[in-house]
Amino acid sequence: MATSPIPDPRPTAPRRRAAARELWRGVSGRVTELFAGLHQLWRRSLQLRVVTITLVASSLLVGGFAYLIADKITSILVENAETDVRVRLDSGAEYARRQFGLYNQPHETQFQETVDGTVNYLAGGDPQQTTGVIVALTADNHTGLIQPRSSPAVNVRPLISRELRAAVAGGKVASQIRTGRLAGERTKYLVYGSPVPTKFGQVELYYLVPLTRQDATAADARDTVIATGAALVILLGLLAGLVTRLVVTPVRVAARTAQRLSAGLLDQRMAVNGEDDLALLAASFNQMATNLQRQILRLEEMSRLQRRFTSDVSHELRTPLTTVRMAADLIFAERDEFDPAVARSAELLQAELDRFEELLTDLLEISRFDAGFAMLDSEPTDLVPVVHRVADRLAGLAERVGVPIELDVPTTPVIAEVDPRRVERVLRNLVGNAVEHGEAKPVLITLGMDDTAVAITVRDHGVGLKPGEEKLVFNRFWRADPSRARQTGGTGLGLSISLEDARLHGGWLEAWGAPGQGAQFRLTLPARAGDRLTTSPLRLVPADATLPFGGPRDGGLLAIGPGSGGVLAIGPAADGAVATAPGRQGSGGRAEVGS
């Protein structure tokens, strides 16, 4: 009966390596996140930076001073020990010289006893001591005749180096610090050696002084200095934190107050405490806020009165305009029976009344936008018929001025949730302006869409816009050429109203222009009401434009919104144009990228 092989439960090498890599990635990711958080905190907190810099600087400074102080204390202790040992060594060498001067040869009777007695006497008289100073006597020149002696009786040769022994044997007084193990303990010793002359030659006398007490004193001094330095550093850090907090807190309060003021809470003020510089800052800030509040309220009141005046005048003019319109219609209907000059006057009266009525309508619409009462009636709308309808309504004007209108729209429906009345008004304004400035050259209307947005561009090949005029094109009552005769009887408010209609949809209305190359306007709207735009299906800079950086597809051109709120933006014409999303006039625009 065949048996299946039992799988090896142990992980293979590739598995282990994969697990190790996965673990490393996880750890490195957490470390990266930690460092990123610390970096962000470092950049945002002035108090943290000041306290950290103070701690680092004070730690280096206190550490340096602590090292110098500890080193100086250690040096003083060692110098005192050396001075004491040198005095004892000189006295002991003189005593030994007198004792050994009684003998002419080292093998004389009682010489060895004299050596033992001298060593014990110099060590303190107790040959059994196991601590304290060790006295040793050697004779390298008489090794066979004089046995080395030490008190207490320990092997001191490991503590006396060859260099020290050679120096003393040569007739010099020398010293060194050595660490060795005597009587079972490892101790640091100060070893001093001096030659002792005798009648039969020279012997060497050594003092070995343990530095245990000096090491303990130096260690205590170092610990005290370190503890004092650490306490000083912590105190400096706390002091820096306190001082920084006293300075940073009013700045933070000022920043929060400024944010509330910018949000429209004009009654916000800072608390003024004391009479120092921070109190002066708070008082000055409050005075500035009061002046700004007064000026803003004054401007708001003036704006409100201006809007009310415009709205009231527009409404009040409706009644006399209606009466004048009725009389003008009667006169215009009977113009064939009048003298030619009177008939022409009737026609001019009728045209100017049409323009006057249109101006009143635009003024009422502008007043609704200014008052914030404009409402959006969004519904799913096919924009293809809207574009065709606008083109058909302006076909007569285009034929009269010799400007053909060309359409580039999809054959399938382009559905978007928009207010069709407002979109059609925007297109009428854009196409009407393009026809008026077309210089007998075609005007191209292009419709495009993607998953999130729809866009319509209106391209003319007229005189274009001069540098800087892109900033003014959406201003109220602005005209590129004040001396130019209007063919359409416009009011000068069309583009301003169109801009507000686009903003009401959450869309963009953008302009591009170059002298001698015409202009192009692009309307971009979200496909679903309430969505936020990020890109546009159509390019703002036309593909046939000659750009200043090279050929038609080598760079980008200026794309700007309203003069008071547009932002300069440059983008490549081949792949897309960076343009502005103009805001309400005077409120600024935001840059978006069109693909």
Image (tube, rainbow, N blue to C red):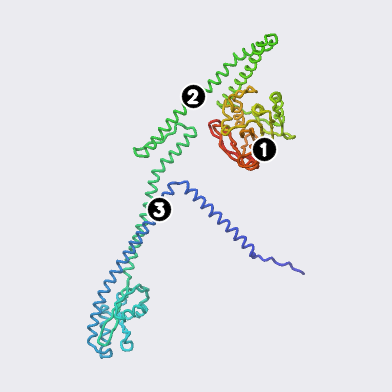
Q: Which residue is mark 3?
A: 55
Mark 2 packing: few (<14 Cα in 10 Å), some, or many (20+)? few
Comes first in the chain, label 1 or label 2: 2
Mark 1–mark 3 Cα distance, whole angstroms, equals 64 Å
| Neighbour tally class for label 1: few under 14, some 14-19, many 20 plus, Cα within 10 Å | few
Q: Is residue 274 above or below residue 139?
A: above
Dot 2 falls on a residue whose secondary structure is: helix
Find residue 381 and report its horizontal and vertical position in percent.
69, 31
Which disc, if any, is residue 210?
none
Dividing the image into 4 quarters, which one contains the C terminus? Answer: top right
Residue denoted by label 1 = 544
Q: Considering depth in this image, is 265 or 283 the residue closer to the camera?
A: 283
Residue 302: numbered disc: 2
Mark 3 and mark 2 lie on one chain; the one further toward the N terminus is: 3
Give the residue at x 72% y 67%: 5
Q: Residue furthest right?
A: 1
Helix, strand or loop at label 1? It is: loop
Q: Where residue 26 sits in the image (x, y, percent)?
A: 57, 56
